[in-house]
Image (tube, rainbow, N blue to C red):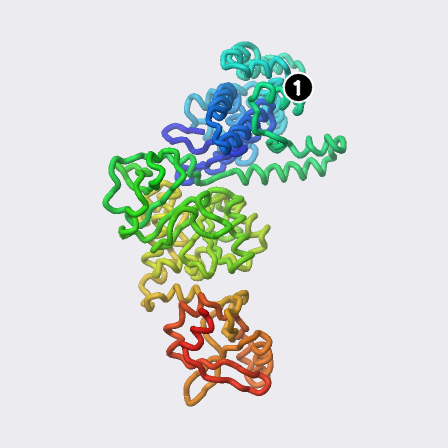
Amino acid sequence: MQYENVNILGSYSLRDGGNINIFMGKNLASGTEVNTYIHELFHMHLTNSSSLGFFLLLLEKEYNLASGAEDMNHCEKIKELSEIIFNRTVYVQEVYANSQELLWIENNLGSDIAEKVFNLKNKDYKDYCNKMRIITSNKKLKIERKKYLIDKICLYALGIPISSDKFISTLKSRQKLHHYFSGDLHPKKRLDIALEKYSRNEDLKEENTILINYLLSGLRDLEIIKYFDKELPELNEVIQWSMKNGTPDKSEVRNWIELNQKKMDEKIKLFDFYNLKVERVQELPEGFGFGVFVIKNCLNIHNKKNFYFISHSLIKSNSTYVSNEAPYGIIENSDIKVIGISSYEYDLKKMKSSYLNECKVPVVVLIDNFNHAKEIIKRILNEGELFIGDLYGQNANNFSTVLFFRERTDPETIFVFPTLKKLSIRIIKELEISQELVFSNDKYFKRILSAFGDELDMLEFIQWIFGFIMQSSCNFTEIDDPATKLSFDLTKTMMNNIFEINEPGHYRRWASLPTKKTLAQPYYSLMEFKNGRNTGSFYGFLYESDHVIIFFTNKIDALNYKARMLRIDKSIQQFHVVGIDKHFWNTHKKILSKIKICVCIDHALDIVILVTVNYLDNKINS
């Protein structure tokens, strides 16, 4: 999709069963997020609904399986076939997406806005829209009827009988396939035929049932399919249901439409490493700046022992991704403050980078896939404690957002997921984590970024990561800069406290405070909570004018102690039993060494003993 004087704002790819990439920065800057989203969804819908689209998805699946088996000759063969067919669908795809996009805008935003969007399009895209003027300009037709007719005409255009002997036999060679599409079977020609039939009020019905088993058998005979077993691109759920049970009723169709929309949304990426346009430089810069992305699996790498380093900078006033390859050791002695990696190079089972050694600086895992994000969050929930933040509240009328999250005991690994606002809401709802969620105007958001020490470093990180994601300068003084716009609340939160004087390590210690879910390793204690958050204050007693805090060896003793003390001290009500774990202890050990601590040996007999920090350290870290 492209407008006059604007770069491409979005794209649809068959990769991995179909993906939509919406360029976050460009769309936010030009205010075209919604119509780009709608436009690319229509591309995906036509692919998923048409016979040629189904065939292309089938070839894509075979290509991926062959690639996994490192059968590059077969990959090349599949790629060649796919490109010939795909190139013949492009015209119909653009006519369909542009026409349906304008109808959607007219229906939802009004005809004036639709006209403005049309006028912004370049000549080619206006021509695509004008192809359907016989329908779209017909004032006697309601918008839903127009959408239906365009749908029907374009499905006819791409409705090649792919399970016919004639089509299957043409796949034997490039020449035969080219010849097959040279006449009336070319999708563009079929589109013209469909429009002629419509203008003469003729029926567009055409018997074109896809005989899947027959098609697969023919493709195997030609060795176009070698790795495909019973795995098929996902069939339309309505078709699957009706094959088993007959015609579905309206409620089932409605459920399928909702499910299908969810699946299409999951395929949308607001950042995509695969589509990153990188300018390779001859020499690496002397310094990487605040941070750098490090990629191992990259087709551009000449020496497989090297890594690919990607940073973001302004070249001749243009925001550009620059890169080169080098040994990993080049950054070990640099002054960078963060390393970025792709979630595709993060080992979810081990919860660590797949290729990097122990890093001296925080690692940011940039996620571009909905299911990756959801799986990582689920893993953290199952094995630890989740800190998660969204840029804006659930009711904010934002198209896009960025989720930041991490596991409480691992401040050095921060996950970042640019996504649709509706997908962030889905994740929170489906995983039932609204209690854990904070927003960027809340000071508790800083816990997620505590590895950066203070607000100044946090601001530098925000500028770096938003600039990279959105290919923008993220200059906080330029209010029209898209990254500045999106990060406004988060930046404001940092600015509000930037001049506060805190001891070194303040945010690390604050973020390490136990939650009500923290497991004891091995002690428990009573800590104060306000508004569901740990304030950092322990409950204790005075001994020789010193405040003494109590550690318990089991949770029952701690709860019994609280119940008993509640009779004489109502303030203990706001103190809750928490586990004292290694992460909290090791972060606070220096401060706790200045406080007297006792361990409850026998709650029933009120027996406690004063202990040293070394004693506790041995018990906790043994």
Q: Amino acid at mark 1?
A: Asn
Q: Residue at x 51, y 73 (%)?
A: 523
Question: Could you say where residue 423 lies in the image, as x and y percent from the top left?
Answer: 53, 45
For this orientation, the residue located farthest to the bottom is 544
Instruction: Say how many tags the image has.
Output: 1
The secondary element bearing badge 1 is classed as loop
Give the residue pinned by disc 1: 208
Question: Could you say where residue 335 lies in the image, as x and y percent from the top left?
Answer: 27, 52
Q: Residue at x 50, y 58 (%)?
A: 386
Is 100 left or right of 163, judged from the image as shown? left
Q: 431 or 398: which is nearer to us?
A: 431
Crowding at dot 1, Cα within 10 Å, few <14 / some 14-19 / many 20+, comes out as some
- The answer to whether one can see residue 93 in this image is yes
Question: Could you say where residue 313 lies in the image, as x and y percent from the top left?
Answer: 29, 41
For this orientation, the residue located farthest to the left is 286
312 shown above or below 202: below
Q: 225 or 254: which is nearer to us?
A: 225
